[in-house]
Image (cartoon, rainbow, N blue to C red):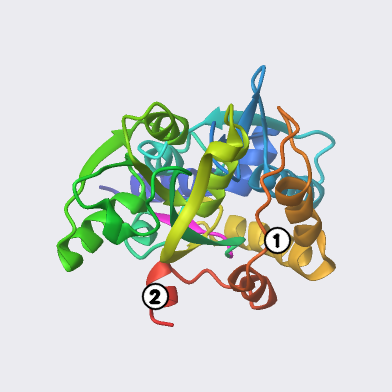
Amino acid sequence: MNKKLSVLFGALLLSGLVQANTLDKIKSSGSVTMGVRESSGLSFTIGDGKFAGFHVDVCQRVLADIQKQLKLNRLEIKYQPVTSQNRIPLVQNGTVDLECGSTTNNATRQKDVAFAVTTYVEEVRIATKANSGITSLNQLNGRKVATTTGTTSVQLLRKHERATGVNFEEIFGKDHADSFLLLESGRADAFVMDGSILAANIANSKNPGDYRIVGEVIAVEPIAIMLRKDDPAFKKAVDDSIKVMMKDGTLSKLWDKWFLQPIPPKGNKIGLALSQSTKDAWANPNDKPAEEYAKK
């Protein structure tokens, strides 16, 4: 390759890298795509293509700050529903700019994507029918246990099964609503998942009093907004916005709004208190993976 072509190729490559920067992409297009979930405790649909929840609110405020930073008169937010199976590929390929669902930050995922500072520390628990008699994982021997395909709960269940010799049949829902339906319809005896997801699905069920969240905390996991890897400018913009919300009390107010007050679409209360682990994460902002939490 001659010198002229080499310089031209380098310029084109540099141009491509600049365009890959999410802030540049947002500024040039005047739009941004937010990945959202349809039945998570932190992000869910309220019908008519509208989405709501704690993480949706957080991301909307982050994007308002980015709009100011980029001096845009208008920023169009596009909402892209994602699932446990496709959320990482859609962030990687640029379809989604920031994923605002209920994704655990762990070391394996950090090889493929980046995470903002932790906004919620989740406790993985068991949901079951109130009359089931089940109060712990060890009572699931010979039972059918639902969980959602593509989630960390699948690995946690298998790890526990190997360690304790408790044998249960795993049944997989394609999303959290589908997994809860397996419990609701009696096809599963328990649903193992993030506590916020269990609480939200119970609150929005036909008869919330028929269900209980029981047993030991199976795992403690940091939940964070997911971003493309190797884009430090965008991560800094997102992190800076969230850190301000941690410091000025905005996150606390949003928690009260979405977990302690009536929420759409049915006006039910999830009733999930703010844990000490989440308070600690807000007081000491970090993007440490779940493996670091497991060491405590």
Q: Residue at x 76, y 48 (%)?
A: 61
**Residue type beneath disc 2:** Ala
Three-letter amino acid code of the residue under disc 1:
Ile
Q: Is residue 279 located in the magenta-colored stretch of the structure?
A: no
Residue at the extreme top: 48
Give the residue displayed 38% in from the left and 50% down from the top.
133
Q: Residue at x 35, y 44 (%)?
A: 5
Residue 49 position in % (x across, y down): 64, 20
The image quarter containing residue 112 is bottom left
Residue 266 in picture, x, y percent from top left: 71, 28
Q: Secondary structure at mark 2?
A: helix
Q: Is residue 114 magenta?
A: yes
**Segment colored magenta:** 113-117
Q: Which residue is mark 2?
A: 294
Q: In the image, is residue 278 above or below residue 134?
A: below
Which mark is on residue 242?
Answer: 1
Please state the horizontal and vertical placement of residue 88, each as a whole percent of the image: 40, 44
Q: How far across and down, in percent of the image, does residue 250 sit? A: 81, 59
The dominant secondary structure in magenta is strand
**47 left or right of 262 in image:** left
